[in-house]
Image: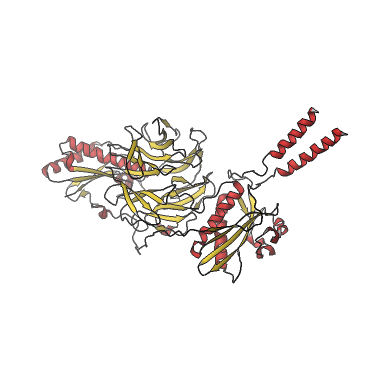
Amino acid sequence: MKRLMILALAGLFLMTAAGCAKKTAAPISSMTDTTPVVTDMPSRDISGIDEPSISGSAVMDDSAMGGSSDLYGAQGLARIQFDFDQYTLTAEARDTLAANAAYLKANPSKQIMIEGHCDERGSDEYNLALGEKRAAAARDYLVSLGVPANRMTIISYGEEIPLDPTSSEEAWAQNRRAEFKERN
Amino acid sequence: MRLIIVIVSFCLFLLTTPGFAAKVEISAPGQQTIPLAITQLLPIEGGAQPEIAREIHDVLTWDLDLSGLFSMIDPDSFLSDAQRLGLTSSAVDFSQWRLLGAECLIKGGYRLAGDQLTMDVRLFDINGRRLLYGRTYRGKRKDLRLMAHAFADQILKSLTGTAGPFNSSLAFISNKSGRKELYLMEVDGFRPVRITDHRSIVLNPDFSPVGKDLLFTSYKAGNPDLYRKEIYSGQEARISSQKGLNIAARYRRDGRELALTLSRDGNAEIYLMGTDGTIHQRLTDNWGIDVDPSWSPTGEEIAFVSDRQGNPNVFIVKVLSGEVRRLTFEGKYNATPAWNPKGDRIAFSRMEDGRFDIYTIRPDGSDERRLTFGAGSKEHPRWSPDGRFIIYSSDEDGKKAIYVMRADGTGSRRLTPPSLGECSHPAWSASWL
């Protein structure tokens, strides 16, 4: 008799247990129907900038960056190209740098800024660093050719200022470059 | 006797298994979803403002659909109870909703007095015939969407234990003005607003996890320098202008330190810096390029990109010991790591044939999964504060735009419209409430 009762109790437990374990999403919380909590939304007034009605293109205006986009920096300093993902100087680049060095030695008061650029492939941040290595490689080679280091500063623009914003091998080859801008 | 003890113990064990605490994980598609009915809110008193009801409905539907937790019951099938205010469980005719197969129900009312809006919202459990969550939100009419987002966050918290991230902000870079400037927008892409006027190149924002400010890099002063900007006051300060690069700064989770790349010593390395720009420590020391830091949530490790072993790959450095290990071994170019808030996955992008796709991997380097496929290049993944979603930039529609998807790669949708030009470098804030 006692055993039967206990078994019946056990059976009852089993049934309640099965009922409690819900199949789909049983919620974490439930609330009684009391007056709900009030949330006052803080005002989120962000200092925004009014958009001027610029109907400009999205292409970067290179002149605002302090240079021209002629093949030569305005005063006879030619740019050099790089291979993909490389900052080493090609033979052609070395020839161009030799010419640039000659120009700079002939104009000893000229100070220049060397810009390093990349094509659009690859990660933006990595390209900022790679662009800097390209500018540094050009600078170091010019130093080895006798141009004093204190006449040159470097800056990287990564992939931010392409010469040719299209996506093609030709455009990319153009964009992988170091440019020489006179600062005075 | 022993048999009885065994049986009773077993039943007691079953009783204590948390049937109530069954958390619903959003994982692979095909997982069972909760049929949800979202009704349009009704006026509590006074005249109806259908635009208010419709907008709240739109916000909730978008958020809860993105969550992946629910399947939506078609509003055209709603019966008469949808027209009743129903702010308490006794006022709801649950049988109507059970007829439609709904398991959860959203109902509520609103009141507009001048420009003050009150939303009285409820989440009901149909099978249990009871209220799961209720709250009254008060604010300005113009903050209607934020109130609805806050409610969506709480709905997720009620059902899963973790609040949603919908009441937060996204930052991104857009060249709509002709230059790359910094913008903010809401999580669903609404109300984009420009917040910088540098007229130069602004890059790579990061929200403070504790304060209401952002870090970003700008060439405004002629060099890639690091700036911090307060979101509400608009106040800006240049905090790091070391020679060379001051890029890709990321706050540690307690907001007290940042990791970034400097090249002041002649090579791009990862540094730790105070929020005032003081250099604390150089973390990497290698001839290669070291960029793109991402903190683990504990702050003990930082994932970053380095080409020290050839092509760019993701590595992990222990902050205290400086010990470095490599994370990615597949593919030839892995970049833009982002450690998720839970700490158990790292998102990154892999370049193949000139195009990037987004992957995630465990911090021990196992279980690599590809999240994005198809045309276009997808980069710069960043996680939502609850770890459920990933935002990223993709040019699959021609120009770069910001997209959001679930952490498993499903549910992707575009956030920035073509009228915003090229948009990239997204970042996700902490939840505001």
Could you say which quadrant of the image residue A169 lies in?
A: top left
Residue furthest toward the right? A1
Which percent across, then down, holds residue B253?
Answer: 44, 42
Instruction: Judge from the rendering whether residue B250 lies leftward or rightward of residue B223; answer left or right.
Output: right
Rendering quarter of residue A51: bottom left
On the question of residue A5 being in view, the answer is yes
Tell me the quarter of the picture where residue B275 sits. Answer: top left
Residue furthest to the top: B2
Residue B233 percent across, percent down from the top left: 38, 57
Q: Which colour scheme is used?
A: secondary structure
Please determine whether, in this image, residue B128 is positioned above or below residue A94. Answer: below
Q: Is residue B352 left or right of residue B81?
A: left
Q: Which of A169 and A104 is in front in this view?
A: A104
Residue B65 in view: no
Which residue occupies the foreground of this view, B253 or B37? B253
At which x and y percent is residue B414?
48, 53
The image shows a total of numbered marks equal to 0
Q: Which residue is drawn at 11% across and 43% down?
A: A106
Of residues A176 and A154, the one drawn nearer to the viewer in this rendering: A154
The quarter of the rendered structure image containing the N terminus of chain B is: top right
Image spot of residue A78 (x, y percent): 21, 45
Q: Is residue B414 placed above or below A176 in the rendered structure?
A: below
Residue at the extreme bottom: B47
